[in-house]
Image: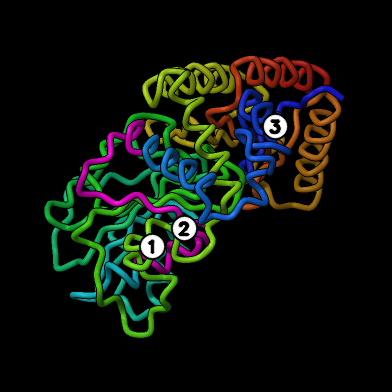
């Protein structure tokens, strides 16, 4: 069967070159006579794999020497707790900028752990369709928390708040290595791998060494302490070995394609092509405000998404959306259904999505609009 264009918000599409390499090495990795899937994480065969993955993260993201690169499990949702447990320890107080579901959930998790949470800005007033501007943050906060790219809402920070000496923490799960990022401006970064780096299963954490405490919040489990992983080179327990192996290959693919700068150029070309079409369409429109638009996730609605709540209008909107998703799938364009909090459709165009895929989507959208106008 032929490959489809996969617009899933995550797990997302992976580079075909990487998939082919993994397939070729499935039964015998590097002459070892075994698959990485069945390889001991303590073996001489596996040690270079995880070491290379860390080295590539450091190279591609220009990670300063005083930062640790960790590979942990539990996804971004576990980081919501780990950040609070490991950083919210002095004043037990943190500032959160609420820009959607994931920032909101992170704040809620910190509150459960006894950290006082200040929501210093929010875009809830417009259904999180923009990034609120926060020029400077001051106060007795242990950290300031942001979600750099909001997968559901399709928004992205085009600036960083000035937090002074307060560590800035960012969830970069859906934008990691989609553009250059100055790691030194952050105290901690984390990213679930399943958007831009690898299959689901590993979470990348980059944390400044002075923030790795020996005394997290009382009762913090061993596995939720950054020091546990930092002291053991991410090998305290069995790591997600195969996912880290794929991650390493994706990082080499990124390097081959120009690194973070090359990804930005590639992603901007794709996003501009799609947004330009949406902004000039009478049938579709993007849901996010200019100046806050994600290069990775593009939610959009049809002209039938009027916001009306009467039964007939709601039914018509659902009918059109369902028809769009069904016909798109038949055309080889999959996973375009929008999130229920936004409605409509959503095209996630991560690093591995090609410009050809975006062009194919736009051609389908033109055809659909003509047939359903």
* Real-space Cα separation, disc 1 to disc 2, in angstroms: 8 Å
The front one of 194 and 345 is 194
Q: Which residue is mark 1?
A: 229
Provide the secondary structure element on which disc 2 rests.
strand
| Nearest to viewer (mark 1 / mark 2) | 1
Render colour scheme? rainbow
Q: Residue at x 18, y 60 (%)?
A: 210
Q: Which residue is mark 2?
A: 72
Q: Residue at x 45, y 48 (%)?
A: 191
CB under 8 Å between discs 3 and 2: no
Q: Quadrant of the N terminus?
A: top right
Instruction: Kindly identify which numbered label has been placed on residue 6.
Output: 3
| Nearest to viewer (mark 1 / mark 3) | 1
The span picked out in magenta is 58-83
Q: Is residue 228 above or below residue 176?
A: below
Q: Residue at x 50, y 50 (%)?
A: 192
Looking at this view, name the residue that lies furthest to the bottom: 219
The front one of 278 and 305 is 278
360 to the left or right of 124: right
The answer to whether any part of residue 270 appears in the image is: yes
282 to the left or right of 76: right
Q: Is residue 213 above or below residue 197?
A: below
Residue 67 drawn in magenta: yes
Question: First in sequence: mark 3 or mark 2?
Answer: 3
Give the image location of residue 253, x and y in percent: 51, 25
Estimate how packed mark 1 is, as few (under 14), some (14 to 19) or many (20 or more) residues with alpha carbons within 10 Å.
Answer: many
CB under 8 Å between discs 1 and 2: yes
**Residue 116, picture quadrant:** bottom left
Question: First in sequence: mark 1 or mark 3?
Answer: 3
Q: Quadrant of the C terminus?
A: top right
* Real-space Cα separation, disc 3 to disc 2, in angstroms: 26 Å
């Amino acid at each position: 069967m032929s490959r489809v264009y996969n617009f899933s918000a995550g797990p997302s599409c992976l580079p075909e070159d990487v998939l082919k390499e993994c397939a070729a090495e499935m039964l015998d990795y590097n002459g070892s006579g075994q698959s990485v899937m069945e390889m001991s994480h303590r073996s001489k065969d596996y040690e270079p794999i995880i070491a290379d993955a860390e080295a590539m993260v450091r190279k591609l993201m220009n990670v300063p020497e005083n930062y640790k690169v960790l590979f942990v499990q539990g996804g971004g949702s576990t980081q919501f707790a780990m950040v609070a447990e490991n950083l919210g320890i002095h004043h037990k107080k943190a500032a959160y900028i609420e820009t959607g579901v994931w920032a909101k959930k992170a704040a809620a998790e910190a509150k459960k752990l006894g950290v006082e949470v200040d929501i210093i800005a929010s875009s809830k007033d417009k259904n999180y369709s923009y990034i609120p501007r926060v020029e400077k943050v001051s106060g007795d906060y242990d950290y300031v928390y942001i979600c750099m790219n909001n997968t559901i809402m399709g928004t992205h920070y085009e600036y960083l708040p000035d937090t002074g000496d307060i560590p800035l923490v960012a969830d970069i799960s859906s934008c990691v290595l989609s553009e250059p990022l100055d790691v030194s401006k952050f105290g901690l970064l984390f990213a679930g791998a399943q958007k831009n780096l690898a299959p689901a299963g590993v979470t990348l954490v980059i944390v400044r060494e002075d923030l790795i405490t020996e005394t997290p919040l009382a009762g913090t489990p061993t596995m939720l302490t950054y020091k546990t992983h930092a002291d053991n080179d991410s090998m305290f327990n069995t790591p997600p070995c195969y996912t880290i192996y794929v991650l390493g290959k994706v990082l080499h693919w990124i390097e081959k394609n120009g690194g973070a700068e090359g990804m930005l150029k590639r992603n901007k070309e794709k996003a501009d092509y799609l947004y330009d079409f949406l902004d000039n369409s009478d049938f579709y429109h993007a849901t996010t405000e200019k100046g806050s638009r994600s290069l990775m996730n593009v939610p959009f609605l049809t002209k039938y998404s009027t916001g009306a709540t009467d039964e007939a209008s709601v039914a018509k909107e659902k009918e059109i959306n369902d028809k769009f998703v069904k016909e798109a799938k038949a055309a080889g364009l999959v996973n375009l259904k929008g999130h229920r909090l936004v409605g409509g459709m959503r095209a996630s165009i991560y690093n591995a999505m090609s410009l050809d895929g975006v062009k194919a989507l736009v051609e389908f959208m033109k055809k659909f609009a003509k047939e359903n106008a």
